[in-house]
Image (cartoon, helix red, strand yellow):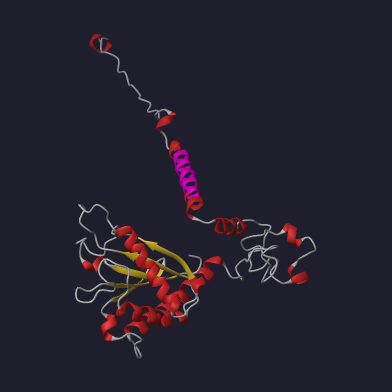
C-alpha cells in the first residue's frame, strides 16, 4: 500500500492549437486583387486616351452614356418617331453616335455612324490617286496598251509612288545626257521628255513640283556650280513644259538640291544628274 501511495501523479497536457495572426489569412489577397484590377483599368484608360482621336473618344463616351440610345441615330427612329424634340440639337451629343439625323450638317451635328467620316474620305482620295498614278505609270511603261514613250526615252525614266505623290525621275546616261554638259541648255531628248510629260500629266489636275539634282564636282573648284546648275535645270524643265502647253498654275514649286541627294553612292557619277517631276497628292 505504501508503494502505491508514493506513485507520481499522472499529468495530461492538452495543447490548444490557435490560428495565426490576422495578417496571415487570405483577406489581403482580395484587397490586392482589387488594387491590381483598378490599376489595370487605369492604365487601359490611359492607353485609350493616347491611342484614339478626339472623335473616337467622343464615340466611346457616347456608347457608355445611358442617356443616348445605341443606334445609328438618336432615339432609334427619325424625327418625332425617334423621340426628337425642338431641343434635340442642344441635348444630343454633337459628335460620335449621337447625331440627330442620318446626314446631319457639319455645323449642327456630327456625322455619326451613318455619315461620311474624314478617314473614309481620305481613304477614297488616296485610292483614287493611286489608281490615277497606276494609269500614268502604265502609259509611261507601255503596260496594257501602246506606250507614250519611245524605247530611247524610256531608258532615262524611272517612276515611283511615295507619300508626296507620283515621282517621274529622268536622268543622264553616259552616252546621252539630258543637258549640254555643265550647262542648263537642254538636249533634244529632254525636249521630247517634256512634251511627253505634258501629255501624260493632262490625265490629272493635281499640282506638280520640279526638283533638280546634279552630280558632285571636285572640291578644289573655286566656285562650285552645283546649286545654281540644279536650280537652272529645274527652271529649264518648267519652261519646256509650259512651252508645250502645261498649265503654269499647276506648278507649285521648282527646287534645286545641288549634289545633296545623290541617287547612287558614287557622288560624281552622271547618274546623279537628274530631274524629278512630281505629280503631287491633293493638298501638297
Task: Residue at the far right: name it.
Answer: 86
> Taking 4 as reference, is 219 above or below it?
below
Q: Tell me which residue sits at (41%, 77%) in the image.
A: 133
Q: Tell me which residue sits at (47%, 77%) in the image.
A: 246
The prevailing secondary structure element of the residues shown in magenta is helix
111 vs 284, left or right, is: right
74 vs 164, left or right, is: right
Which residue is at the front of the view, 240 or 9? 240
74 vs 223, left or right, is: right
> Taking 169 as reference, is 86 above or below it?
above
Determine which quarter of the picture holds residue 185: bottom left
Q: Quadrant of the N terminus?
A: top left
Span shown in magenta: 30-46
Which residue is at the front of the view, 93 or 259? 259
Which residue is at the front of the view, 271 or 185? 185
- Tell me residue 60's x, y (percent): 57, 57
Q: Tell me which residue sits at (29%, 59%) in the image.
A: 226
- Tell me residue 234's x, y (percent): 37, 67
Q: How many numbered marks appear?
A: 0
Q: Tell me which residue sits at (39%, 81%) in the image.
A: 195
- Tell me residue 131's x, y (percent): 43, 79
Q: Is residue 119 magenta?
A: no
Amino acid at each position: 500500500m505504501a508503494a502505491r501511495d508514493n506513485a507520481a501523479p499522472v499529468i495530461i497536457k492538452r495543447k490548444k492549437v490557435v490560428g495565426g495572426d490576422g495578417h496571415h489569412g487570405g483577406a489581403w489577397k482580395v484587397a490586392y486583387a482589387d488594387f491590381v484590377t483598378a490599376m489595370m483599368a487605369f492604365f487601359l484608360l490611359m492607353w485609350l486616351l493616347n491611342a484614339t482621336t478626339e472623335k473616337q473618344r467622343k464615340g466611346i463616351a457616347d456608347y457608355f452614356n445611358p442617356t443616348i440610345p445605341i443606334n445609328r441615330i438618336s432615339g432609334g427612329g427619325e424625327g418625332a418617331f425617334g423621340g426628337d424634340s425642338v431641343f434635340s440639337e442642344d441635348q444630343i451629343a454633337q459628335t460620335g453616335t449621337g447625331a440627330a439625323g442620318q446626314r446631319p450638317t457639319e455645323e449642327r451635328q456630327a456625322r455619326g455612324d451613318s455619315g461620311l467620316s474624314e478617314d473614309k474620305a481620305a481613304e477614297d482620295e488616296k485610292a483614287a490617286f493611286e489608281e490615277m498614278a497606276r494609269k500614268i505609270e502604265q502609259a509611261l511603261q507601255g503596260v496594257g496598251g501602246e506606250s507614250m514613250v519611245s524605247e530611247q526615252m524610256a531608258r532615262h525614266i524611272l517612276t515611283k509612288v511615295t507619300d508626296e505623290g507620283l515621282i517621274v525621275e529622268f536622268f543622264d546616261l553616259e552616252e546621252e545626257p539630258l543637258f549640254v554638259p555643265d550647262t542648263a541648255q537642254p538636249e533634244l531628248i529632254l525636249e521630247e521628255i517634256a512634251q511627253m510629260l505634258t501629255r501624260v500629266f493632262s490625265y490629272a489636275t493635281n499640282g506638280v513640283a520640279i526638283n533638280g539634282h546634279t552630280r558632285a564636282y571636285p572640291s578644289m573648284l573655286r566656285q562650285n556650280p552645283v546649286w545654281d546648275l540644279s536650280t537652272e535645270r529645274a527652271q529649264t524643265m518648267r519652261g519646256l513644259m509650259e512651252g508645250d502647253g502645261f498649265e503654269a498654275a499647276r506648278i507649285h514649286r521648282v527646287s534645286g538640291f545641288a549634289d545633296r541627294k545623290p541617287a547612287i553612292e558614287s557622288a560624281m557619277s552622271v547618274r546623279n544628274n537628274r530631274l524629278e517631276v512630281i505629280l503631287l497628292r491633293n493638298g501638297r
